[in-house]
Amino acid sequence: MKNSIRIFAVTALALAAMAPAMAQVGKTKTLAPRVAAQKSGTMKKPVAATNQVSGAVKGEPKGKTFVVASKKGTYTVDASKARCTYKGKFFSIGSLKGGTLVMVTGPAKGSTITATEVKVTYMKGAAKSKPTKAKMTSSGH
């Protein structure tokens, strides 16, 4: 009888100690997507913020680098890997002149912008395009 009480007590203590562990067996932890990505190594590194600066080109470009004066300050633009356009067509950085208005998009580090896109918005001395009118034919169409 004493032995059966001891066995019962030991079994009850063992079951009580294992109960929390057994309760966890059916549950799985779900990590937040960001934590899961960090643990798996698939999380992308943060990208530098993309800035957009509009202003006038100061002086002549030196290679693929030029300076833009804007309301925010003066920026040195590295356009070596940028797509440059004027009126929707590709445009050469070497054709920029002082006073040309541009809109530069790309990540900035201090006062230097590594341009991904340069749009020429106004070019000094460029001919203004005039809308064309369609001619009416004698048939009235």
Image: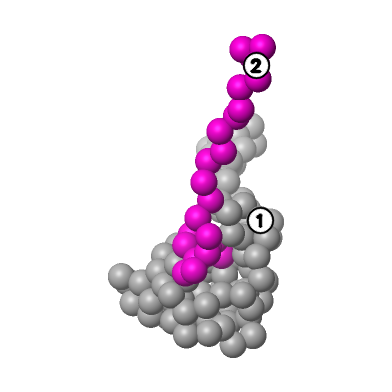
Quarter of the view holding residue 14: top right
x then y, percent, for residue 32 = 54, 45
Pointers 1 and 2 in contact (C-beta within 8 Å): no
33 versus 135 height, above or below: below
**The magenta stretch spans which residues?**
118-141
In terms of secondary structure, what is the magenta stretch mainly?
Answer: loop
**Mark 2 or mark 1, which is nearer the start of the sequence?**
1
Q: Quadrant of the C terminus?
A: top right
Question: As drawn, is 28 to the left or to the right of 97?
Answer: right
Q: What element carries label 2?
A: loop
> As shown in the figure, which amino acid type bears the numbered disc 1?
Lys
Q: Which of 108 and 30 is in front in this view?
A: 108
**Which residue matches tag 1?**
89
x then y, percent, for residue 136 = 61, 22
Q: Which of 105 and 10 is in front in this view?
A: 105
Q: Give the residue drawn at x 53%, y 51%.
A: 129
Q: Give the residue drawn at x 56%, y 83%.
A: 61
> As shown in the figure, which amino acid type bears the numbered disc 2?
Ser
**Which residue matches tag 2?**
138
Q: Is residue 133 magenta?
A: yes
Q: Give the residue drawn at x 40%, y 69%.
A: 55
